[in-house]
Image (cartoon, rainbow, N blue to C red):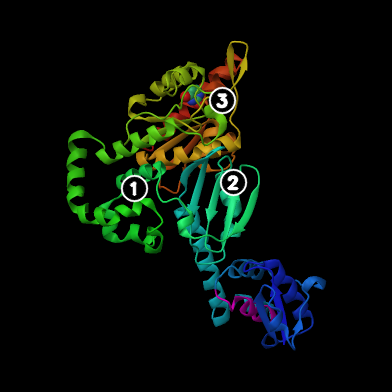
Amino acid sequence: MRVVALTSEDDFEGWRDAARSLAAARIDPSEVVWQVGDQPGDLFGDEAVLPSAAPELRVSRRFVGLAQEAILHSDPERFALLYTLLTRVIARPGSIEDKADPLLRRLDDMAKSVRRDIHKMRAFLRFREVADDSGPRFIAWFEPDHHIVHANARFFVDRFHTMRWSILTPEVSLHWDGETLTEGPGASKADAPQDDPVEAVWKTYYASIFNPARLKTGAMLKEMPRKYWKNMPETALVGELIKGARARELAMVETARTTGPGDNATKAWAALRDEAAACTRCHLYKHATQTVFGEGPVDAPLMLIGEQPGDQEDIAGRPFVGPAGQLLDDALAQAGIDRSAAYLTNAVKHFKFEPRGKRRIHSTPDAGEINACRWWVEQELLIVRPKVVIALGATAARSLLGKAVTISRERGRAIPLDSGAEAWITVHPSYLLRLPDPEAKAAQHAAFIADLRTAAARL
Ligand code: URA
């Protein structure tokens, strides 16, 4: 028997190197024992495989992709199954496409289950805010089905780059201090805080998006497996919501008919705005006068997202009231759009500036600041549920699409969002204000109005 001791449950490199050595030596899968960690007792009479001297081996990308995912599955047999598949693929490269092969199907199912688990962690993990001597810190508890925590670490670092956070799971804990990711031992649910003000927002928000019509089809229950309910603050409301769903559905229809947007959406929005007023997700709150939150009808079919409040917005506490706002107002009017019927907000909710004498000079928010503030924009999108979202400029586009894009390339076409809404990208009004050449200015101004008109025509 050969024994391979992998360093961790998700040690893909260790598995790969050992598998290469074993395959090169034509060792039959039945001759190999795979285990995680050093268990010297198990080596008695057996030969340890030292995978470091692994020869190169060419296999298809499809195999490598499958192995990288399936290896994260919790099934202890996965290492052996993958090695068996590897020996087959070496003998018959085409066998990786054999859809009827039960081994391949089993491994494909494992990879799928891992992908689903990765997605669930991203979608259902909730941070609770706590404070320590250095300020706010966010803690989340999550119980994955598979060994996916490391595979998801980069996602959470990118997404919550400017926050200090810890993710606790039974197997491992991850800690991000704003600069460095460290790893600690597993934890228990009791180590994570159970309740905090962030939950209040979630609960109100969840009540507002709870849609009895979707519940009837089971769509929402399918998206949110029961297993996760216990860790999500909003699910404390589920039983109550189901009980009252029919009555509330009728009441909401009646309210919407007589008074406009549902009361719940208005409440959720107000709770969100109040929460944002105390936002310290990034450092910009330290020098700005106040959070400038979005404004407009909470059921607006059109949402416009700007970059960040300017000097005047920072003082007034309202978006787009300064020079760029005036240009935008004119352009909206020329495009036939009623500003008061649209929801206006910014990708970044605090004014970022450089002090120069008595003046405060606008400074463009960086990726970390945009990412930190994306959480608010996402909540605004979830509550307002616009049909069309216009991103004004690169910062807004980055916030909305979650990646940097080139305006000239994306402009003039609908970009579908996960929510079902359409995103339209155009320039920022400040760009038009800055253009020195009158001819270029007029041309760009006309193009801006045309962009607004095209997007609004989709409503
Ligand atoms: N520029 C923006 O992007 N937003 C404002 O609110 C004001 C100026």
Residue that carries the numbered disc 3 in the rendered image: 352
Q: Residue at x 48, y 62 (%)?
A: 143
Measure how far apart labels 3 and 2 are at the Cα level: 21 Å
Query: Which class describes the residues within 10 Å of circle 3: few (<14), some (14-19), or many (20+)?
Result: many
Disc on res. 158: 2
Can residue 216 be spotted in the picture?
yes
**Which residue is the extreme one toward the front?**
133
- Is 309 on the left-hand or right-hand side of 296? right
> Of callouts 3 and 2, which one flags the residue occurring earlier in the amino acid sequence?
2
**The residue tagged with tag 2: helix, strand or loop?**
helix
Q: Is residue 251 above or below residue 283?
A: below
Residue that carries the numbered disc 1 in the rendered image: 206
**Are the residues flagged by discs 3 and 2 in contact, CB closer than 8 Å?**
no
**The residue tagged with tag 3: helix, strand or loop?**
loop
Measure how far apart labels 3 and 1 are at the Cα level: 31 Å
Q: Is residue 300 magenta?
A: no
Magenta segment, prevailing SS (helix, strand or loop):
helix
Q: Which residues are magenta?
A: 75-88
Picture coordinates of residue 435 (x, y %)?
59, 18
Ligand 1 lies under 8 Å from the Cβ of mark 3:
no
Mark 3: which amino acid? Lys
Question: Which quarter of the image is occupied by the C terminus?
Answer: top left
Mark 1: which amino acid? Tyr
Picture coordinates of residue 339 (x, y %)?
36, 25
**Are the residues flagged by discs 3 and 1 in contact, CB closer than 8 Å?**
no
Q: Residue at x 23, y 35 (%)?
A: 260
Picture coordinates of residue 308 (x, y %)?
51, 27
Question: Which quarter of the image is occupied by the N terminus?
Answer: bottom right
Query: Which class describes the residues within 10 Å of circle 2: few (<14), some (14-19), or many (20+)?
Result: few
Measure how far apart labels 2 and 1 are at the Cα level: 25 Å
